[in-house]
Image (cartoon, grey):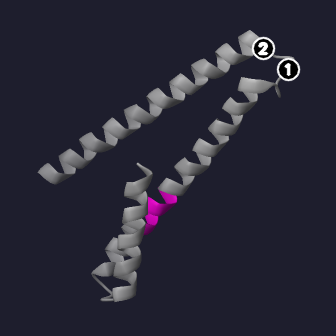
Amino acid sequence: MKANRNELINAVGESVQELQCCIDRHRRLVAAVLEQGADKPGVGHFSRLLEVHSSREREKKLKTAIRDAIEDLEQSRKSFKSKQLESLRKKLTQVLADMD
């Protein structure tokens, strides 16, 4: 029970952190539009913010896919005693840890 509570607290903390990053990105995007004008969407900083946003969205989707794969491998671990699946799960877990 305590482990589930800690996991929930950690998940909420991560979610709040992601929301704060999104709010900061949105603030910078709005500031860039106001500084450069909405009629010049491909200029300088504004264009870079759009690229960063797209990159972060892809990274977020990849992290979610990796977490899902790790969960599936963890569940199948009890049914299948495979060294290859265990190795894959550990590699994915390490990749996810390195991304954070």
Q: Secondary structure at mark 1?
A: loop
Our reading of the magenta stretch's main secondary structure is: helix
Among the 4 quarters of the image, the one containing residue 84: bottom left
Q: What's the amino acid at mark 1?
A: Lys
84, above or below 97, in the image: below
Name the residue at the left extreme.
2
**Badge number at residue 40:** 1
Residue 52 pos. (x, y %): 64, 37
Residue in the foreground of this view, choosing between 93 and 68: 93
Residue occupying the point 34% across, 80% down: 86
Is residue 2 in the magenta section?
no
Residue 4 pos. (x, y %): 20, 51
Q: Is residue 96 left or right of residue 28?
A: left
Residue 56 pos. (x, y %): 58, 43
82, above or below 37, in the image: below
Residue in the foreground of this view, choosing between 47 and 54: 47
Among the 4 quarters of the image, the one containing residue 36: top right
Q: Is residue 81 left or right of residue 38?
A: left
Q: Secondary structure at mark 2?
A: helix
Residue occupying the point 65% across, 22% down: 29
Q: How many numbered circles does the render carry?
A: 2
88, above or below 80, in the image: above
Among the 4 quarters of the image, the one containing residue 98: bottom left
Label 1 environment density (alpha carbons within 10 Å; few <14, some 14–19, many ≥20): few
Label 2 environment density (alpha carbons within 10 Å; few <14, some 14–19, many ≥20): some
Q: What's the amino acid at mark 2?
A: Gln
Q: Which residue is mark 2?
A: 36
Is residue 65 in the magenta section?
yes
Mark 2 and mark 1: span between their CA atoms? Answer: 7 Å
Q: Are the residues at dot 2 and dot 1 in contact (C-beta closer than 8 Å)?
A: yes
Name the residue at the right extreme.
39
In the image, the segment drawn in magenta is 64-69
